[in-house]
Image (tube, grey):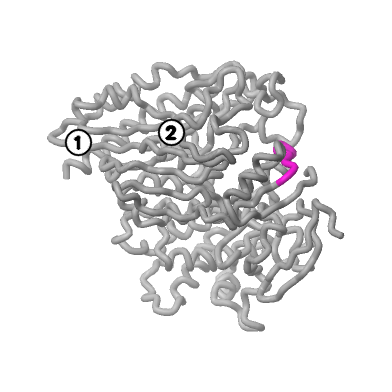
Amino acid sequence: MREFHYRRPARVSDALALLGTDPGARPLAGGTNLVDLMKTGVERPALLVDLRDLPLDRIEATPDGGLRIGATATNSDLAAHPDVRRRYPALAQAVLAGASGQVRIMATVGGNLLQRTRCGYFTAPATTTACNKRAPGSGCAAIAGEHRNHAVLGATEHCVAVHPSDMAVALTAFDATVTYETADGTGELPLAGLYRPVGGTPHLETALPTGALITGVVLPPAPVAAASRYRKVRERASYAFAIGSLAAALDVRDGTVRDVRLAFGAVASHPWRARRAERALTGGPADATAFAAAADAELAAARPLPHNGHKLPLLRTLAVAVLTELAQEAAR
Amino acid sequence: MTAPTSSVITLHINGEPHTLTVDHRTTLLDALRERLGLTGTKKGCDHGQCGACTVLLDGRRALACLQLAVATEGRAVTTVEGVADGDRLHPVQQAFLELDGYQCGYCTPGQICSALAVLEEHAAGWPSAVTADLRPEAGPPALTDDEIRERMSGNLCRCAAYPAIVRAVARAAQERPGESGTVAA
């Protein structure tokens, strides 16, 4: 591990000054991903700016019925929050489906959004494997190698890694906005716009300005989210990354879909909002045939690799199962 | 004069202050084991995947291998050495002992620290991934074997003593003050 300086500012402005002046500075929150990547040499910061003392850990209802989540709120506090469990249950389920109890207690919301892919070629301690995220231009070893859990949507010949977050999938389904600050002022991005398209530059992962610090996430009011669910398929019952996952919310009246939100996880370099499927369903019947057709419409753009084609039927089955459950519960 | 990549810090461990100079790269786990002689906390994977290094920070579970020592200043650390009351074992420790909640014992300090926190988290009403009804009005779910397995899933046991670990946690849960004893063991 490279030697580094450590600072623990008490004010956001002090943190921004530190992050803005040293290009080797990185914010430290829970450290569950960053410290691990520092051990393997993937991350080599010159300065860690510990966010622990910043007043960014609150979770509070907004006057319009939404929710504001501070960037350093922990995953476990988010999942336990009464408003999250009542109004955005898929978000609580997504958070609880991620990692382990210990990791959720350490990890934070801002850090969750900025965590790096778990692609084995990216995280490997050796620097001998090709990885365009680690060494731009070196190639992508996953395309001809181990890629069972890699992307089926939105990938390019430069990178096929997936974003590992469960939380971000639910946040994307509910149109979350990310707020940030730089030394020049505040800004915001829709979460769907936080992650840059892979293109030819997979090492450039977010649209945040240089030196920016995520300060929080804002969820707009979403009555449909009260009837929502997150389901994750993985290779063991707990404490594993997804093969595929789905955040879904459904408002059905008299058998007709009034509103629907769908986002897939573990399929792309970012949470995949299934807007094509949402459009196909809205105003139509809430039955298994329609759910399957909508999933097919979304997945028509998929380009599976030789060893991850199983994700497509898995995602289709997931969508039909979860939407059918939500429709049946709405009919009760 | 301290080099800029190290700091003098005071760690509060099991109620005792310890002042030491640490290279910033030092994890809490290595500080405990290599600098302070507190070897009860174990190093398994050193990458946050096995739970052997689980300690309590301000009463909550944390992985000491991913926690930098320098970032632990000002927080209360409880290791397995601080769990018993003198010679009197904590009920969680007693349950692991009586029900053979281990084989080789290497993961046990992490299992015990984790179990202590699991009981607190459950009592505080925290849901888990297997909790059927997430509504806060539903109250804490019964601490079934499935709930215990899910909540303890961050602690691996290579000897696979899992059935006895689940029984030990269930026993300790039943012995909590005010517990009605409705949990299936």
Residue furthest to the bottom: B87
Residue A64 image offset from top left, x and y in percent? 29, 46
The stretch drawn in magenta includes residue A45? yes
Question: What is the quadrant of residue A225 in the picture?
Answer: top left
Chain bearing tag 2 is A
Magenta range: A41-47
Sequence-wise, which precedes: disc 1 or disc 2?
Answer: 2
Is disc 1 placed on a helix, strand or loop?
strand
Quarter in which the N terminus of chain B is drawn = bottom right
Question: Is residue A273 shown above or below A251?
Answer: above
Residue A72 among magenta residues:
no
Which amino acid type is marked by label 1? Val
Would you name the residue on which mark 1 appears? Answer: A252
Report the residue that reaches farthest toward the left. Answer: A254
Q: Position of residue A76 (x, y in %)?
A: 48, 55
Amino acid, disc 2: Pro
Q: Quadrant of residue A138?
A: top right
The secondary structure making up most of the magenta span is: loop
User: Does mark 2 fall on the same chain as mark 1?
Assistant: yes
Residue designated by label 2: A190
Q: Nearer the viewer, residue B139 or A47?
A: A47
* Up-down relation of residue A277 to residue B4 (above or below): above
Q: Which mark is residue A153?
A: none
Q: Residues within 10 Å of mark 1 (few under 14, many from 20)?
A: many
Q: Nearer the viewer, mark 1 or mark 2?
A: 2
Q: At 63% from the left edge and 66% from the top edge, which residue is drawn?
A: B75
Q: Is residue B34 left or right of residue B48?
A: right
Point 36% across, 62% down: residue: B141
